[in-house]
Image (cartoon, grey):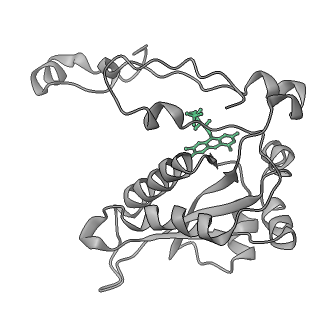
């Protein structure tokens, strides 16, 4: 661990939830396929609506492929991803395979799969960093995808954490595990919810 983790849970929780965070400084050394397969194995066992398993992951295995994926990221993400050993895209099939009907829960299920992957990564000493900052058009073109069929949800950096000093000054300042709202902001008994316990804004 290169960065101090000051996160403190309010209630007991397994430390794996606190240990997962999204660094930007990564060691530029290739990950072997056993490790990558272990991450996808964790994603594999995520629950999904009708057990559809709508998630799709496309990842780079060498520098040439990585360059192509790097080019699809927005500039703010491209800078720090240059050192990331594996860049991937997380996607979801939007229709059920058995009847081609819309799968409203595909994004939810794919979110569960990515979180499983992220937690397994920490078990192996790795870190992940999801990214919405990518050029949608470029990704759909590169992967030859139809937006009606596949939702490209996020890009993903995977690797071992490196020293914050390797980042530029602006990113260095952001290189620490951030905090969260307390559970009262998002968990309610039915009665307190109905009595207006939930406010759309100003909950902090
Ligand atoms: C869907 C998604 C999109 C994100 N997009 C970006 C991004 O484009 N660039 C970036 O640096 N971080 C991005 N993040 C990282 C979030 O800022 C980060 O997860 C959040 O601040 C919580 O911090 P933590 O992951 O370190 O716990 C993204 C995270 C998620 C889940």
Left or right of 50? Residue 23 is right
- The quadrant of the picture occupied by the C terminus is top left
Q: Residue furthest bottom?
A: 98
Q: Residue furthest left?
A: 191
**Residue 14 quadrant:** top left
- Ligand 1 quadrant in view: top right
Left or right of 175? Residue 93 is left
Q: Residue at x 42, y 68 (%)?
A: 44
Left or right of 144? Residue 192 is left
Q: Residue at x 55, y 45 (%)?
A: 122
Compared to 116, does 138 lie above or below?
below
Q: Residue at x 71, y 47 (%)?
A: 160
Residue 138 in percent (x, y) is at: 76, 67
Residue 58 in percent (x, y) is at: 63, 71
Q: Residue at x 48, y 30 (%)?
A: 18
Residue 12 in percent (x, y) is at: 31, 24
Residue 184 in percent (x, y) is at: 30, 18
Compared to 162, does 83 lie above or below?
below
Q: Nearer the viewer, residue 190 or 67?
A: 67
- The quadrant of the picture occupied by the N terminus is top right
Left or right of 170? Residue 140 is left
Q: Nearer the viewer, residue 8 or 146?
A: 8
**Residue 16 quadrant:** top left
Q: How many marks?
A: 0
């Amino acid at each position: 661990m290169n960065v101090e983790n000051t996160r403190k849970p309010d209630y007991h929780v397994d430390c794996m939830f606190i240990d997962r965070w999204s660094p930007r400084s990564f060691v530029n050394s290739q990950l072997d396929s056993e490790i990558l397969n272990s991450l996808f194995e964790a994603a594999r066992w995520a629950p999904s609506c009708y057990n559809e398993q709508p998630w799709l992951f496309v990842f780079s295995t060498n520098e040439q492929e990585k360059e192509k994926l790097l080019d699809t990221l927005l500039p703010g993400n491209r800078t720090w991803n240059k050192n990331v050993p594996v860049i991937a895209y997380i996607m979801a099939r939007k229709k059920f395979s058995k009847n081609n009907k819309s799968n409203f829960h595909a994004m939810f299920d794919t979110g569960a799969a990515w979180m499983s992957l992220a937690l397994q990564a920490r078990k192996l000493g790795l870190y992940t960093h999801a990214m919405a900052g990518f050029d949608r058009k470029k990704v759909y073109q590169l992967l030859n995808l139809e937006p009606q069929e596949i939702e490209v949800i996020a890009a993903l950096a995977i690797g071992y954490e490196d020293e914050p000093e390797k980042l530029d000054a602006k990113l260095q300042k952001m290189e620490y595990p951030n905090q969260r709202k307390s559970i009262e902001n998002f968990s309610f008994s039915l009665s307190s919810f109905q009595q207006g316990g939930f406010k759309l804004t100003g909950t902090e």
